[in-house]
Amino acid sequence: MGPLVIPHSQFLIPNFCQGGIRMNDVANRFAAKVFNLSIMRQRLPKGTYKEMLRCIHEGKRMELGTANIVANAMKDWAIEQGATHFTHWFQPMTGITAEKHDSFISPDGTGGGSAPSGIIMEFSGKELVRGESDASSFPSGGLRSTFEARGYTAWDPTSYAFIKDTVLYIPTAFCSYGGEALDMKTPLLRSMEAISRQALRVLKLFGYDGPAPITTVGSEQEYFLVDQGIVDAREDLLLTGRTLLGAKPPKGQELDDHYYGIIKPRVQAFMQELNDELWELGILAKTEHNEVAPAQHELAPIFTTANIAADHNQLTMELMQKIAHRHGMVCLLHEKPFSWVNGSGKHDNWSIATRDGVNLLDPGTTPFENAQFLLFLCAVIQAVDDYQDLLRISVATAGNDHRLGANEAPPAVVSMFLGDELSEVLEAIENDAPYGGHDREQLKIGVDVLPRFPKDATDRNRTSPFAFTGNKFEFRSPGASQSIAKPNIVINTAVAESLRQFADELEGAEDFTQALHDLIQRTIKAHKRILFNGNGYDNHWPQEAERRGLMNLRTTPEALAHLLDEKNVKLFESHGVFSAAELRSRYEILLESYVKILHIEAQTLMDMVGRNILPAVSTFSAKLCENARVKGEVTGVACGYEKARCKEISRLTDEIYALCSTLGEALHHADAAEDTLERAMRYKDEVVAAMAALRAACDSCEAMTPSGEWPYPSMIDILYSVK
């Protein structure tokens, strides 16, 4: 069977030059579907609006009377926008979002004991603030039993409600009847409160007298676009999001001709429609371009608060997939959909700022600002060093294991890049030595001026997992499909712990300036092992990292084995981000997810091989044998090609058949493990290896089989399917 390719003419491809939001109308349409502060100011009574501001900015609890007023205004606005239903939109531990739609209609009470004669449109404060959902059907890691079904959704007023597809979406947290967090949002909000609380303590030491600072995030999103017809013809892409087999194409990304290249009209049409919908939802989509691999692209937004950034990224991924389908394409968010080209990541750009926009990771121009910047910088350095295992765990998935350390993404070893100039500044402080960048003055915190260096003083290090880029840190390890909540929970909490230790020491200091200098100097000395400005792809770096005492957790099971280490449980419990039970539930869920993903992949691969590949190549080899027989009888020639090719394909066929059995045995042995971690380890060591061997044999066989005889579209068909 040849590859199934649906002609492009069968798809309705919108003309991106017509319709949509034109640039001169973007300002008017931006956030048009969002119940934000601007809409609230117009529609809420003055006192209610002020109460909402206190809830959003100060975390004050909302009274039911206030909630009723907000709910009524929100309902009226939503209906005017065409909404008929509302939903509490939450983020369970599946990594994707969940929703249940309820209409605004209620009986008007005019029917007496019989059926109502009419309806009214209602939405109460109680419905806004709290909802109820089945908590037993979502992953809970043992927090909930199947018979314990009750769970609650609670409104998050810091993330604005919005309208999508005639439904009013209300961002909510999701917890169990007993109050345990069953979602991504709740611990993210807790971690944001933790770092805000500790950062405020530190800022007050420098004379700051404002509200608690906030963490900000901008998440770049990489993805692939492939023709829908191609995906429909590939069982592996449909079920797993990646190709489980496929011979290497003659051309991949070797010429670097796709990166920043001309965007194809079909892709441009998709990007235009995506921008239109993102902008109407108030998502600050800013940059779009072709990425390195064929069919790969990237979208990057402007910074916003960590909580809203996480919500927006979930929406972005959902809309990418939905809009791609409208254009006859599939958006692949798997970290490694194709073996022979780069995979996709999600760079998490993290910083911390005051609410009036002062970035605490900006070096500044005065001694006051310099000292404050250096203290916050050291807090991040200490956090990354102390909790390098948690940072690796925060990006640990079966998909991301294919990508990390593959000369296309940061290595599994967590390290920090600061650049040459900032590194020289820290070295001078560490050694009480003159700084050679400018006037060679000895640096003492709070006394001498730290020379102001430009934000781009050093070239970016694309191989570093955690790189300082002028006024923020770019965590480059997260995978394309994952929620950014997980890495930001870890960063926020780990930095909060550093700031807590710093505040405890400095608040009681008799000589603040000297104590500050000593603390920064001591922190640099204690944690400089995590700083690495070199090439993370270099083969010698893992050995150097081991010599420094850094961890190299290459795979998800190896990383997750450290999640419940005493220091990690203590970190999350002490800052109220996770209880021990909640953390253990994450441990179980992540291991189970890893096992289930690999199990589905292995079963899919065996199904593709057994049902289609083996029969196809057997039929083709039989044709070769018959051709050789007939040709030899007629011509008397040796038929060297037919005989040699038939012999090699027959050998590979037997090998593939045997390797299928080996994979089945590996699955059976892995599934027999009673302990979850042991099961995951067996999948890592045995199932992954068996899948790789089976794939290699199939790919070799594909390279010898005519495309018309091979049952699946080739890598060439896939990577170059979107014209």
Image (spheres, rainbow, N blue to C red):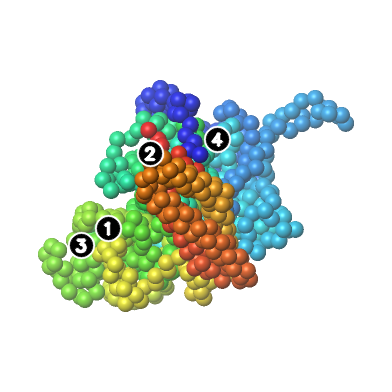
Q: CA distance from mark 3 to mark 4?
A: 47 Å
Q: How far across and how far down the image is residue 680, in percent?
A: 54, 66
Q: Are marks 1 and 2 in contact (CB under 8 Å)?
A: no
Residue pointed to by mark 2: 720
Q: Residue 533 or 58: which is nearer the viewer?
A: 533
Q: Are marks 4 and 2 in contact (CB under 8 Å)?
A: no
Residue 84 left/right relative to 490:
right
SS at mark 1? loop
Q: CA distance from mark 3 to mark 2?
A: 43 Å
Can the viewer see residue 212 in this picture? no
Residue pointed to by mark 4: 164
Residue pointed to by mark 3: 421
Q: CA distance from mark 1 to mark 4?
A: 39 Å
Which one is in front in this view, the residue at disc 1 or the one at disc 3?
1
Q: Residue 267 or 366: which is nearer the viewer?
A: 267
Can the viewer see residue 431 in this picture? yes
Q: Residue 345 or 155: which is nearer the viewer?
A: 345
Residue 177 left/right relative to 607:
right
SS at mark 2? loop
Give the vertical position of 381 relative to 357 (above or below): below
Tell me the quarter of the picture where residue 380 sits.
bottom left
Which one is in front in this view, the residue at disc 1 or the one at disc 4?
1
Does label 3 or label 2 sit earlier along the sequence? 3
Residue pointed to by mark 1: 461
Which one is in front in this view, the residue at disc 1 or the one at disc 2?
2
User: How many marks do you count on the picture?
Assistant: 4
Does label 4 or label 2 sit earlier along the sequence? 4
Q: How far across and how far down the image is residue 605, in percent?
A: 53, 53
Please state which amino acid type lies under the numbered disc 1. Answer: Asn
Give the vertical position of 195 relative to 704 (above or below): below
